[in-house]
Image (tube, rainbow, N blue to C red):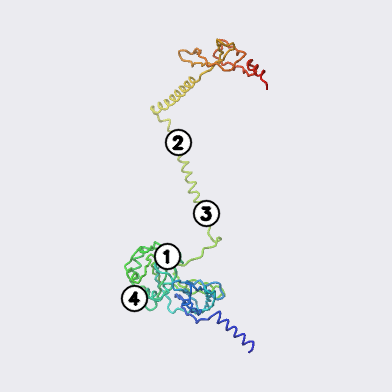
Amino acid sequence: MTSNTILSRCILLLVLGFGFSSNAEYVHMTEVFVLPIEPSMFNWTLHGAKIRDQYEYRPTQINSPDLPTWINFVYSSRHQQGFLFGVPPQWPDAKQIEIEIVALNKETYETRRRVVPLFVKQKQSPAQYEVQLKIHNLNVEDLFEAHRQNRLLDIFKQKLWTASADDLHITMLASAVQLGARLPLRPTEGEGVVLKLGSAKEFSAALRELQKEVKPLWKMSSCPRDYKRTSVERIFRDQRFALDWCSFKLQENLVTKIYTPASDDEYSDYTNAFVDENDVWDAPPSRENVPTRSYTFEFVVTIIVPMVVLILLVILISFILCFHHEGMADDGSEEFFNSIFSICEDYWSKRNEEGCERVQMLQYTPVHHQNEQPLQSTLRRVPSPTPEQPFAQRSMTTSPASSLQRSTSPRMLDEDAQYTRPNPPPYVGIYNNNNHSSEYAQSDF
């Protein structure tokens, strides 16, 4: 056996062991496709699964770190399988894209790989009319079930839009949470699904009447569950679809835009092929291209004009008060203003007199006691003068005698100087007293 044969067999074993190639999947531009990913694609079975959600999948575009922007992946625990779905944009020619899927067995940590080629073909009759819907009680993976999807399409094909029975299809499908809605308060409730149904046939009269019925609700971005019931509510409720009528809209005369790669990269990111002419988003200009604005006029209006008006009012009031006051004569006002000054003068004069009566002079005079040789000092209260007796006589009431013994008497005051404040008495220490000095002299330190 030659070396080339051995090498080819090894490569074959590696391919069979680690990767599988699937048959090509054909999808159409501007139409939603769904590709389920299940364990059977990797020769695994759910019957031997020991734990729930035992298998994990990671799809990417081959030789790329992620999927294209128009392809989404979601895993459903209820179905225990993943789903690739999206809407291919409108390209000039058919294209082929290879999707690499890596599967992991969480129980044994075994990994397997598979490459799924996608062939994107042209749509023969692209949709020119679309109906936008939002369903509250469903998740995205619920519409991947064929029977549920067929029930929704049959409502339009048989009752609301019978002309679209031949080519009605889903042109957009996304989760409401992915588009910015909030998760429901109850985990058992659906997250909500936003989708568009497209056809090349014109809208029926029933759809146009339904749009007029719900048009007043467009001012609200989203309606709560059971917020509004329409005339066709029973048709959808019978099939277990709870619609958000605030999001119900008809879009017509759509323009199909063909996108070409901006570079040589064949798989560069594209946007949706079908857009509304009146709903085109333009990128914001750069900072250098933003026009400048002068605030001079706003400054003049907000600052200068009020100041000018205030100055004019001050001048007008001053002119009225200054120049027209001389010709105005009011005896009552003059008498009132004069009486105010008289009242103030009387008040202050009385207050000054009361303050003088509160002032009392204290005079120090010596007092002789019968059984003591040294003189004792007292303080006498000088009475306040009155109109009948401007110079009141001093009260002879004496204060209690001082407890300190003095060897010498204070300076005597003349009779004429009785109303003057005397000098303070001399300080007598313990060593100047004869009795205390003798006791300290005899004490033994």
Q: CA distance from mark 1 to mark 2?
A: 78 Å
Sequence-earlier tag: 1 or 3: 1
Number of the front mark, 1 or 3: 1
Specify the amino acid type for callout 4.
Answer: Gln
On the image, the x and y values in percent for residue 408 come to 62, 13
Kindly identify which residue carries mark 1. Answer: 187
Sequence-earlier tag: 4 or 2: 4
Marks 2 and 4: in contact by CB < 8 Å? no
Image-based side of 159 in relation to 405, left or right = left
Kindly identify which residue carries mark 4. Answer: 158
Q: CA distance from mark 4 to mark 1?
A: 34 Å
Kindly identify which residue carries mark 2. Answer: 319
Number of the front mark, 1 or 2: 1
Kindly identify which residue carries mark 3. Answer: 294
Specify the amino acid type for callout 3.
Answer: Ser
Specify whether residue 344 is in view.
yes
Residue closest to the eye, 119 or 317: 119
On the image, the x and y values in percent for residue 72 come to 48, 72
